[in-house]
Amino acid sequence: MWGLLLALATFAPAVDLGLGTPGASGLGLAPPATTKAPVSTLAPSSNPAQQPSGKNNGTSEQHVRIRFVKKKKVIIKKRKKLTRPRPLVTTGPPVITTPAGALHFPEEKEPGCPPLGLESLRVSDSQLEASSSQSFGLGPHRGRLNIQSGLEDGDLYDGAWCAEPQDAEPWLQVDARRPTRFSGIITQGRNSVWRYDWVTSYKVQFSNDSRTWWGSRNRSSGMDAVFPANSDPETPVLNLLPEPQVARFIRLLPQTWLQGGDSCLRAEILACPVSDPNDLFPKAPALGSSDPLDFRHHNYKAMRKLMKQVNEQCPNVTRIYSIGKSHQGLKLYVMEMSDHPGQHELGEPEVRYVAGMHGNEALGRELLLLLMQYLCREFLRGDPRVTRLLTETRIHLLPSMNPDGYETAFRRGSELVGWAEGRWNQQGIDLNHNFADLNTPLWEAEDDGLVPDTVPNHHLPLPTYYTLPNATVAPETRAVIEWMERIPFVLSANLHGGELVVSYPFDMTRTPWAARELTPTPDDAVFRWLSTVYAGTNRAMQDPDRRPCHSQDFSLHGNIINGADWHTVPGSMNDFSYLHTNCFEVTVELSCDKFPHENELPQEWENNKDALLTYLEQVRVGIAGVVRDKDTELGIADAVISVDGINHDVTTAWDGDYWRLLTPGDYMVTASAEGYHSVTRSCRVTFEEGPVPCNFHLTKTPKQRLRELLASGAKVPPDLRRRLERLRGQKN
Ligand SMILES: [Zn+2]
């Protein structure tokens, strides 16, 4: 049982699943020792300096310490050399060895060969072939780096390619469809909760016609090279070829595998395009964007620099601020974009995007950095859509909620980081399980019939246990909660990766311990609308030819899903936003690959650009207005806006302004505030662009007028005093 539990805890993070371990008191603690450092083994001829930094830290530190005593200057150089991120492959003179002799193409200059796209699905299922496979679910199309199986084995969605046990000479083949300069291979074992299978060594062969093959040879011995492969199921292992090879086909031929297991692997191929002067082959599809933006991965320093540049370019519509610090002391920077940055304007809704709460899910971070560049640029160019967005809304972009986790993932690199490393914050806390669980107190009160008369259906307070100094609450979580309480956000999305789907609250199942169960909020119609808007404008989700990422096909349901119906997440940010503040928030899973290679970023930007803009514009769906005191015309803060038939209220901001997201229809809306008579009026939300104005003027109750008279020290006439006594007797 322990073995099973451990296996579940270790390998269960299918997709973006949070590992809510039962023993972690619901505060999102990571299971111990889940991540192993990826090891990169190198082909015999490779220069050790080409090793991606990371696993060697232990040895390099030791090395540094020893040298430290002798000579300080040398050490600094050494350390720099070992920690500087560098491309996987250095460019050398073109090496073209094709014994089959047919094709010679000059290589296109690339700083290091990118992945061919087994993980990103750019390589289609039909490009993958194998000598044999145990079942369809273990077919060659499953031999993709980081592919995740479902919880059960033996279905259509297993976690690797596995050859038949009786297959004496197994191979997995990739057809690049055009001459390609192959430079390296990354392998993993099988992703499974129930089994251990991985390949411990393999050979590599190449072909131009899939009939004549030649092997990758050791430079010194001239023998076929045998590459050392994996020693666990999850850690990606990189092998660089002793000599890059130009060919159309590449084969991996497992030589040995874990005893008692099968020949199973997941792979990525590193390959540079070569130019094709005779146009013999169809061009590789272009992965471009016409927007001149900075399409790179940005670590903390580069991100800070980029944000500063955007701020300098667009000083009138941007402001950078920090909402706090990570456990390691990195600042949580926010880019605010609006026509009057730094202030809440009456009637102008506040919206936010949050990315990177799981540090290894890197695409959201880059999309927000691209979005801020794009908004600035298009504002300067006078684009009407962007101008309206910046004039009518106040946008807050937090690209990195978990910068510590990101730095860990970034150092490993987009291909070698694996599936889980960098997900948690420095303390091992999963931030998306770390918010206060307000669902349980609300649902208990509902079961006792106390909502909304005794217990409110909105703005539930933080539970006492959560506010204690020794509560397991990450500094990143605390910072975001204080941010949520400080700014009257109306709409938000938090950006994740590892799947292609939009999930909406509730994220936690109502039945305790249910692993999954449809658990809609009272605002289900709005949440389904919001999710559909993003999913319907995201190009990747709308591609009818795309295959499912891992083990579920969300396209059958419009690429949206109720979070709890997918997998329960207690303490999620979405649920907390909805129950503690006015803000409606959904989770966007942006791509199958959590950390796409840099060369995928232009395409991913194009996939998401319209969706990111259109989603923010949904803050106009519903009603909005100001609740004012009828005598003074002053706005009333914290007035409650209730809609008949929806058991979830929102409140006004400091100046009395409010926004209530609603789908089209007729609504009876009530505004109430302490010391005022409530007012109910009907408001119609149409399909026209809103929000529909729905203002309220409230009159003070006599009781309140008396209270204020007394508080101001005025003399109270005897008859009023008698009334007051009577009121006191009624105890309010
Ligand atoms: Zn995530």
Image: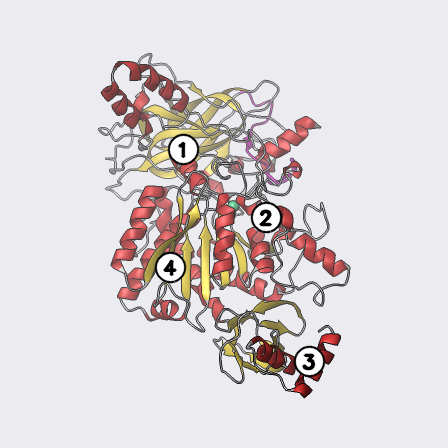
* Side of 628 relative to 344 (left or right): right
Residue 336's label in the rendered image is 4
Dot placed on the residue nearer the N-terminal end, 3 or 4: 4
* CB within 8 Å, label 1 to label 4: no
Q: Which mark is residue 724?
A: 3
Q: What element carries label 4?
A: strand
Closer to the N terminus: mark 2 or mark 1? 1
Q: Name the residue: 38% across, 34% down.
A: 411
Residue at the spot 30% in from the left edge and 42% down from the top edge: 280
Q: Residue 641 at what x, y percent from top left?
A: 59, 72
Q: Answer whether residue 283 is visible to the viewer in this image.
A: no
Cα gap from disc 3 to disc 2, whole angstroms: 39 Å
Residue depth check, mark 2 versus mark 1: number of the one nearer the observer: 2
> In terms of secondary structure, where does tag 1 sit?
helix
Q: Residue 448 or 134: which is nearer the viewer?
A: 448
Residue type, numbered disc 3:
Leu
Instruction: Name the amino acid, label 2.
Output: Thr
Query: Any mark on residue 425, and which?
Result: none
Q: How crowded is mark 2: few (under 14 residues within 10 Å), some or many (20 or more)?
A: few
